[in-house]
Image (tube, coloured by chain):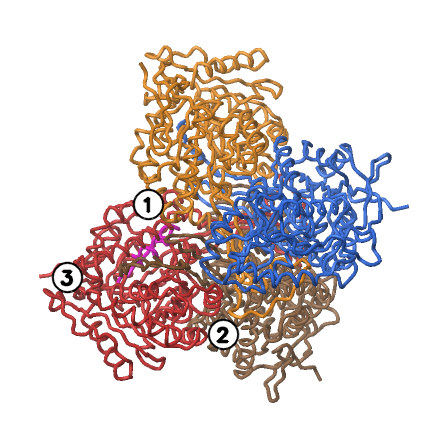
Chain colours: A blue, B orange, C red, D brown
Amino acid sequence: MSSRIDHFIAGKQFSEADTRTGPVFNPSTGREIARCAYGSRSTVDHAVQVATEAGRRWARGSHASRQAVIFKLRDLMLHNFDLLAEVIGREHGKTIEDAKGELGRAIEGIEFACGAPHVSKGEYANNVGGDIEVFSMRRPIGVVGCITPFNFPIMVPAVMMTMAVAVGNSVVWKPSEKVPSAAIEFARLWKEAGLPDGVFNVVQGDKEVVDAILEHPGIAGISFVGSTPVGEYIYQKGTSHNKRVAAFTGGKNHMIVMPDADLDAAASAFVSAGFGSSSQRCMAVSLLLPVGHETADRLLELVVPKIKALKVGAYDDPSADFGAVVSSESKATVEGAIGRCIEEGGQMVIDGRNVSVPGHPDGYYLGPTLFDRVTTDMQMYKEEIFGPVRGILRPATLNEAIDITNEHEYGNGSVIFTRDGKTAHRFMMEVESGMIGVNVPVPLPTASFNFGGLRRSKFGDGHLYGPDAARFYTKLKTISQRWPEPDTAALPISLAFNPAG
Amino acid sequence: MSSRIDHFIAGKQFSEADTRTGPVFNPSTGREIARCAYGSRSTVDHAVQVATEAGRRWARGSHASRQAVIFKLRDLMLHNFDLLAEVIGREHGKTIEDAKGELGRAIEGIEFACGAPHVSKGEYANNVGGDIEVFSMRRPIGVVGCITPFNFPIMVPAVMMTMAVAVGNSVVWKPSEKVPSAAIEFARLWKEAGLPDGVFNVVQGDKEVVDAILEHPGIAGISFVGSTPVGEYIYQKGTSHNKRVAAFTGGKNHMIVMPDADLDAAASAFVSAGFGSSSQRCMAVSLLLPVGHETADRLLELVVPKIKALKVGAYDDPSADFGAVVSSESKATVEGAIGRCIEEGGQMVIDGRNVSVPGHPDGYYLGPTLFDRVTTDMQMYKEEIFGPVRGILRPATLNEAIDITNEHEYGNGSVIFTRDGKTAHRFMMEVESGMIGVNVPVPLPTASFNFGGLRRSKFGDGHLYGPDAARFYTKLKTISQRWPEPDTAALPISLAFNPAG
Amino acid sequence: MSSRIDHFIAGKQFSEADTRTGPVFNPSTGREIARCAYGSRSTVDHAVQVATEAGRRWARGSHASRQAVIFKLRDLMLHNFDLLAEVIGREHGKTIEDAKGELGRAIEGIEFACGAPHVSKGEYANNVGGDIEVFSMRRPIGVVGCITPFNFPIMVPAVMMTMAVAVGNSVVWKPSEKVPSAAIEFARLWKEAGLPDGVFNVVQGDKEVVDAILEHPGIAGISFVGSTPVGEYIYQKGTSHNKRVAAFTGGKNHMIVMPDADLDAAASAFVSAGFGSSSQRCMAVSLLLPVGHETADRLLELVVPKIKALKVGAYDDPSADFGAVVSSESKATVEGAIGRCIEEGGQMVIDGRNVSVPGHPDGYYLGPTLFDRVTTDMQMYKEEIFGPVRGILRPATLNEAIDITNEHEYGNGSVIFTRDGKTAHRFMMEVESGMIGVNVPVPLPTASFNFGGLRRSKFGDGHLYGPDAARFYTKLKTISQRWPEPDTAALPISLAFNPAG
Amino acid sequence: MSSRIDHFIAGKQFSEADTRTGPVFNPSTGREIARCAYGSRSTVDHAVQVATEAGRRWARGSHASRQAVIFKLRDLMLHNFDLLAEVIGREHGKTIEDAKGELGRAIEGIEFACGAPHVSKGEYANNVGGDIEVFSMRRPIGVVGCITPFNFPIMVPAVMMTMAVAVGNSVVWKPSEKVPSAAIEFARLWKEAGLPDGVFNVVQGDKEVVDAILEHPGIAGISFVGSTPVGEYIYQKGTSHNKRVAAFTGGKNHMIVMPDADLDAAASAFVSAGFGSSSQRCMAVSLLLPVGHETADRLLELVVPKIKALKVGAYDDPSADFGAVVSSESKATVEGAIGRCIEEGGQMVIDGRNVSVPGHPDGYYLGPTLFDRVTTDMQMYKEEIFGPVRGILRPATLNEAIDITNEHEYGNGSVIFTRDGKTAHRFMMEVESGMIGVNVPVPLPTASFNFGGLRRSKFGDGHLYGPDAARFYTKLKTISQRWPEPDTAALPISLAFNPAG
């Protein structure tokens, strides 16, 4: 019998009798390894009540006391590095090395949040007029509802919630039901770091929990990372309950390669960024756009052997380049996308179906698949595929490549490979993506900048980490202050508009 | 026959045949002075199309070229000061002096927007790792839909739209149909300032125009100032079309007076901030909360003669303290509120009904009205009254006064009068208002800080002016850039997560 | 008899009997056109006393009141544009068009200073620990002594002093005795803009005035622009009197041209930036470094006809490309430098000596002069030449070009022309100059960034304009504040270090 | 025979034969416990050469790699907390508890420096005009010479040098020869944290080392903390070698107590902040200024028993409130000051001479000493006394108290105790001190703000920690960049001033 993974509320495991549960799989073996409790509205009610009370005290605490917890959390992440990588890999399927890369980025986000006392400062001005001083403070918004995807079981929650907590909020977090164990481990680290019970709460579950969070009047803001259809739903529903919402959603990231580029570097970048983590990353490169047929042909020659050399394997196989996809449904969906692409006339260069991984006949494995001559009318072009299927388009010019990129529904990350300054500059000015790379595989900004796409890759004007996240998780109070003299002469009355005067 | 006020699109007056129109009144006389065209969906379509094209060019322009227009606009505001005050006063009813106060604040907002090239800068970091430089830029979001109220025909539009335009957006603006002339004057000044045609567009009208703006796929963001019910509608509908929305709404601003305060200053502040502009300001002080009966009694003694000395009159009567309310409907509503307050047990101290203004028998005049012993269960307490009716509550302690303030639906501005540092500090930490005053009548922040209330006084996380407005009106692009060596050695492939690495 | 130009102190012309005077020339004609009073220690004493008192009131004024003056100053600069250009040209010798370019930049600096209330804000943090709030304010330092060169009679003073005054300081300014009239005009505009008398003071003169300023205990800081030897003296002497000093000094700006560059653009840039204003600019390009002989030969072919087409003429000759040098001494010095370069083996390509300008036989004219094959051991290479003599060096590689640039005494501005991203990036990372250009003639930063060179092109860590100038002209006060409860329990005594605790 | 404490250069102990040495004492026992090597010019030469080379590589490293070292240093500080406290106490004489307080503050400074990648960012602006992008980067200045005092053997070095190193500089540090062991321990922690050898170097010694540092052409900047006479010398000499210098010097901090204050809290604050660490802190409260005789008398009554209850003892006596002064010379100096104050007419309230500490007859102990009716003409008022002698002045009014404070030579920290908002505000606006406290004992700003006094308490415009320290330790490079089109049309030549155009 598999073990049960529960909620984490008020600083401890929270179990409900008679609760729905769902299976948790090890994608590398295809076996169910646990049951995950699915919360209900009442679970969320309870968590919000706990978070509200704990949050009120946490918000009143000093910056110094909060910062101490964040620094300690960082230490604990380092001390539990291998354990966390194992927990991630087992339920997600990504390789241990890949999981460690994720953890490295999570720690960077925590490190940035260590600077919250500075990043969340207000401004001060003496005597703006009439001997009035004006100053502002950023205060926590209250309880933040966080909804995160399966593909980064620790990194996305860490970069999202650490800043939220650091500036004084409490959180109610619904992780993906596919990777519930990492959430519990993360919650335990927070507790061990000294976070008061009730500030950080995990409610496991599915859409029922999501809806309860979106509708709950005790939740002030929503942070979401996941797919575009869900993100759009979250944005619309969360705002319809008057919350502030920032939803970071899908990507179909284009990588343009110019004839003058370092083609070998471009080829390596495409393979790394395209197939890493079985392509289950919103920042994965989905499409390769060499400019001109000659570039395309030369690039293809470089890319194909690199892809063919990739090894698919279990998450704990140190020789594997990437692992299984997250679920059997996902595998079927990706296989369906491959089939449809063939039907639509995509030219299959490498077929990753029917890959076999010795010892794991039931794992959800898919080998790397590559299509050439993909066109923008194909379904394969239009939708985000969360599996190792990548495509090549063949624009004739840079203009065409930029137009293609901008006409896609998503605007998360876009990359160009070139040596030419003007070409890179035109690209960054004209391409409508939130994160732009020049000769880098994955344009994920470093932790002291901000994450966020454009168009249907992001809903709302907030940001996920970096300085602007501190703004999203706070509300401004602006104070206009004047002190009276011990014996003030009577002020004249004037009803004309002269505020603060 | 009265003249017709039309739209302003593509740099010129835009008239449609067969259009609906509505009356425009001079509240001081009660006479219809013009007809205002009411736009339709197709008017909005046209304006958005114009704004999109003009905006694309404007966004590509240099910071310097945009800044030149903003400086010129400031000059023109000064040169047209008297004219604008007259236009405001005639359709709104506020006194010329009050209109000039409004214009002064509008100019402050424009002056802050003169610094847009600085305020909208991105950040730069060399070598964040792997020889990668990361930098960010704030780019205009596109077409901004602006919806503004009647009570500040120029100030609200100016502080809202100048920053929007300064950072490179174009706008489609629906002003209040009660004050359409100011919108046309303002649009003309923009044109005269050198703004390219089509960047700044006015569509006159009512809810049909509002809905068309909220639903239009060509509009990226919505800025709204107005009442809470409308603002909530705007926030929910705008976001349901995936736009970013910042809606600044109603206020019922509490002014707490401590026993140690400079009572005469407090009394003057209450009268000025309470009755100015016939109380038709979201930052008006609505309620006076002296702490303790002794304070209340002493304050009442000071307040009553000051209120009784106020003179109501036509907008162009230089001896008037304030003018008519904006419409006959508004007058009736306010009179209804007075009547209901009497019914509910409010103790009427001064009755402003039945005021007569010589020479203007049909103007929408109301005299200042004051109730004592208002309680939180009265309708008069709960709703924002856009007319010169103010109330006194009598909390026993500071705690009670703060609790009352925080339990109100609105959290726009709150003010305390005290000499004690701790009392003021507790107030600013504990009161849940976005704008807080200490010994100032109206806590409207100066233009280099941010405007915005809390709770149901603001929807969304954006701001109206100040540095954060520049964020609301821009989207971030973050670039990760690495340049290849002339002869790069082949990069190793690693599919582990190491973005930008 | 020529007129006399006097000091400007306490808001009006200030004349002393028995004062030394010096001649003021019109370089275009070589004629003395006025006498300039030379102040003494007692003149400076008087000015500092006036500035101290006026400054004390000015510093107490509101940000709003100061900002109003800065905006008005900008208006007046525009309204007096032609007059100022004429005054500059007559005493300096630069063409009217060039003087207008200078004024344009001056106005940009003033425009940035319009944002002083924002740029000079402090920071605020509530509850950093122990319920203590900490905030900071930037206060004016007091009286600033400003010493400026002849080559930008209005721009340098404007970008320097406007921010100093905007944040609340008063100034005592010693302009170059060669261009004293512009100083008086500028002082008059300040007065007309509403600046209180005594905040802005001009003391004309020579080294005696400089020394009096540097030594005066009533002066808190020194801003200097001029030559390196003088700047070094100023830095050392000013700091030996415990003042803060920022001295911006000489340049010998290198322009590197790579083989892949747009050579025609590079050639034009060299001619414009090299010979403009008779090369009397610290940001002028002094040396051209094509990389590789082929690049050098091709570039030379493009450059020579462009230089030969340049016309030297009187400041008010609209067809002149540049004018006379500032004085007969300067002309002799430059001619000496040409002669020495010939002796040292420089290969003269164009000889600008013996140019004649019809109608102005006594003007201090020099034609454009170009040397090829200049080497780093030549005097011509080492020293800043304030006259139209430019040289070409022929490095073999980019590395050599960067090394040459970095080994020069000065590090003001350096420029590269290339199309390659990596080349530009290497250049900006490796070259030790404060202002770096990529494919631009003159890398003078825009007004919202900071001016300043490295090595012996700047002394001190301050900046001339941009946000960091606001820091140089202010001192920080940081306040740690805790308010006691009405009835505080006795605090425990602990002598261990726990500041503010 | 006592052990020898040596230099630390290039990552290891550095010993020289034939070197001068000086004694190191344990002030608690009065015994020599070690000999400290005294470096010479050649030691400094060697260290600078090592630092230059190591620094060049360190500066080229990534922000991420540097940040990793800073985080690790913080961990090591925590892990070596007790050891460091012991090392500090033994050579300095302060109690272990006090040393731990110092370490806590040191760690706060290190924590702020963990955010260096954010704090040291440059700015970016696209298209400021003419399609030019402008951006800035802050680069390390090179080798920083650091000179620190005995009184905070770890805190001052930590807050000073951690930011210097974090932004990419290397350091040559001369600690006080009285506390050389802490320097070696700190250097070892840096090495253990992963800092490359040669980036952090310690040269022990006396004035010869100081002069060698100030004069060395390989050192770019000087940070100093110590007494005012030495700081003035350092500022003048360092700048005479064209370095940037920030010298933080003495204090004579005034504490004003208003009649409305919480007197018991004020009394406790005075005793804690006045006598902690035997008053050997530049932020110690030196003088108590009750306003009005009644306040003075009441305060005296509260203060005297608190002071009499203080226990002087050995650094490792956990019951001691404070320890010995640092040296026998210091003890003699302080005793001399006490004697002179008696002669000058100070009214001795408590006499701390002739204190005896059982078991430590030769320790440099002084008991707490208090004078009332100190006047501003007394030597005791004028000079900083680094020993437990405090005085009371009796101003009649707040104005008089502020005037007294401002007329003192020093302007480090000033404190007021009051409940009145206006009084506190007037104080912070009018008092000329860099660090101001309102109802706090010691107004040392938290680590994310800046340290620095005014007047003769600081020389130069730099800061010691906080965001502005990152500016002091970096130089700006500002890049103006335009990329040419693939086929550029020839640019027109214009020699008029239009930089970067």
Subunit of label 1: C
Disc 2 target residue: D219
C165 within the magenta span: yes
Could you tell me if the residues under marks 2 and 1 are in contact, i.e. CB atoms within 8 Å?
no
Judge from the rendering whether residue C479 lies leftward or rightward of residue B308; answer left or right: right
Residue drawn at 61 percent across, 83 percent down: D21
Residue A60 seen in the figure: no
Cα–Cα span, label 3 and label 2 = 47 Å
Judge from the rendering whether residue A417 lies leftward or rightward of residue D269; answer left or right: left
Disc 3 target residue: C34
Subunit of label 3: C
Q: Earlier in the sequence, mark 3 or mark 1?
A: 3
Identify which amino acid the numbered label 3 is placed on: Ala
Subunit of label 2: D
Identify which amino acid the numbered label 2 is placed on: Ile
Disc 1 target residue: C69
Q: Is residue B137 above or below residue D311?
A: above
Furthest residue in direction right, as rendered: A1
Where does residue B382 sit, x and y in percent of width and height?
A: 58, 21
Q: Which mark is residue C362?
A: none
Identify which amino acid the numbered label 1 is placed on: Val
Q: Nearer the viewer, residue C372 or C317?
A: C372
At numbered mark 1, what does the secondary structure look like: helix, strand or loop?
helix
Q: Is residue C288 above or below residue B43?
A: below
Cα–Cα span, label 2 and label 1 = 43 Å
How dense is the environment of label 1, judged by Cα within 10 Å: few (below 14), some, or many (20 and up)? many
Q: Are marks 3 and 2 on the same chain?
A: no
Judge from the rendering whether residue A499 lies leftward or rightward of residue A66; answer left or right: left
C171 within the magenta span: yes
Where does residue C340 sit, x and y in percent of width and height?
A: 26, 81
Q: Which residues are magenta?
A: C155-175
